[in-house]
Each structure stands twice: as C-alpha cells, then as structure tokens.
C-alpha cells in the first residue's frame, strides 16, 4: 500500500460524467488540444493536452512549466468548470482551490511514461485525477524510479488522489483499452488532473 493514494472507483455517475464531458468539450473549443514536446529532444508526446483554470501545464523544447496562456493561441486558458472546483473541495482535503486542470487526451496507442508531478510550488497539495471514456492502465511505484510498481485499470468516472507520500511517487499510463466507452463515443481516454500550483498566501 502507498500512503496517501486514494482510489475512488465510480466516483462520478453517468450523468455527472456526461455533464463534465460537456464542460470539457466547451473548454477545448476555446483551448484546442495541442501536441506537447519533450524538453531537449523536442520529441512529441503521444498524448495531446490542453488546460483550464488560471494556470496550465505545458511542455516544449525549453522545459516543463505552468503558464497562464495556451502555447498556440496565446489566449488565457478557459475557466475551470465549477463541477471540478466542487470535486476538489469534496475530496482534496486541502483548503485552497486548484489553479490548473491539465486535460490529457489519449488515443488508443498513446501512453504516458513513468513520471512524478514536480512542477508545482505547492508540493503539500494533492493532485486529483478524473478519468473519462476508455479504460487506461495506471501504474504507480514509489519515490524512486526503480521501486516496484503495481497497476490498476482506471475506468470512466474513477477518481485517483495522490496525497501525502503518494504525491512523490512515480506513475504513468501504460496503455489504453481501445474499446469505446461512454460518455465518449470514440475510442480513447480523457484524463483531468487538478493541481494547486502556487503556494497559498499565508
Ligand atoms: C493519467 N495521470 O491518468 C495520468 N498525475 O492519464 C497522472 O499523471 C497523474 O493520475 C498525478 C496524480 C494523479 C494522476
Ligand atoms: Fe502525473
């Protein structure tokens, strides 16, 4: 067991998933998915990304960072849907609102290598993740890359929280089940991760 890992299978019911999908589609109509690239090599990610909220996580040749605008359109990120603020309030156990919602889109065949979320100054805040559509095989290990890992399929409506020591653990998505799953009509998976980025005022 990993201290601080919270798994909430089926946290969002079908109507809540559909409503959230509509809100995310609306955000993506203003802030289209783009294909980020790796710092240094410039190799493209297989996952496409966008964000909503005051800040968004981006990656390009020059590095990983949070910024307040879309890298292609240069427009401010769209507002965070109220349903996501509510979900964070209900689950995060953290007294300040999230500032970024990273939107990841996986086509079948896309994956996300083992990584740690480390670009946030508010390191004691959890990261809350919500899955929609096709299943994804989530793998989580320990604080060192070589630590043993375990895997769990994440389905539409599932929520994962990385808090406490789990917040520092390596994790990734090995593969996507190509079977189309509601509320999406196409094969693929959406994942939303809510983050507090800046240190709250004190
Ligand atoms: C994904 N998730 O589920 C990738 N990060 O597509 C993450 O990278 C992640 O699920 C931090 C906390 C929870 C996560
Ligand atoms: Fe992550």
Image: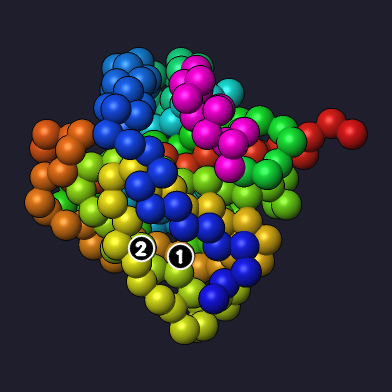
Of badges 1 and 2, the one in the foreground is 2
**The image quarter in which residue 1 lies:** bottom right
Q: How is the image coloured?
A: rainbow
Query: Percent x, y for residue 139?
Result: 39, 68
Image label count = 2
Q: In front here: 197 or 84?
A: 84
Reply above or below: 168 against 74: below
Q: Secondary structure at mark 2?
A: strand
Q: Secondary structure at mark 1?
A: strand
Which residue appears farthest toward the right when viewing the image? 202
Residue drawn at the location 70% of the way across and 51% of the way down: 123
Q: CA distance from mark 1 to mark 2?
A: 7 Å
Task: List the residue tagged with mark 1.
Answer: 171
User: For the residue carrying disc 2, how many other residues have a C-alpha within 10 Å: few (<14), some (14-19), or many (20+)?
Assistant: many
Q: Which residues are magenta?
A: 79-91
Query: Percent x, y for residue 160?
Result: 47, 53
- Which of disc 2 and disc 1 is earlier in sequence? 2
Residue drawn at the location 16% of the way across and 57% of the way down: 177
In the picture, the disc for residue 108 is none
Query: Percent x, y for residue 167?
Result: 61, 60
Residue drawn at the location 35% of the way across and 47% of the way down: 10
Relative to 48, 127 lies left or right: right
In the picture, the disc for residue 138 is 2
């Amino acid at each position: 067991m990993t201290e601080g890992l919270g798994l909430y299978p089926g946290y969002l019911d079908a109507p809540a998933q559909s409503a959230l999908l509509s809100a995310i589609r609306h955000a993506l109509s203003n802030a289209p998915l783009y294909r980020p690239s790796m710092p240094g090599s410039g190799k493209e990610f297989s996952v496409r990304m966008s964000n909503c909220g005051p800040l968004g996580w981006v990656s390009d040749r020059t590095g990983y960072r949070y910024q307040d605008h879309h890298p292609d359109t240069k427009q401010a990120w769209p507002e965070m849907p109220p349903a996501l603020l509510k979900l964070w309030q209900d689950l995060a156990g953290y007294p300040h609102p999230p500032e970024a919602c990273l939107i990841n889109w996986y086509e079948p065949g896309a994956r996300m290598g083992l990584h740690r979320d480390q670009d946030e100054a508010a390191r004691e805040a959890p990261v809350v993740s919500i899955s929609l559509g096709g299943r994804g095989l989530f793998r989580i290990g320990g604080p060192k890359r070589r630590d043993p890992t375990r895997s769990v399929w994440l389905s539409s409506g599932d929520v994962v929280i990385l808090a406490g020591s789990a917040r520092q653990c390596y994790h990734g998505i090995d593969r996507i089940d190509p079977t189309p799953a509601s509320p999406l009509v196409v094969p693929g998976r959406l994942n939303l991760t809510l983050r507090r980025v800046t240190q709250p005022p004190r």
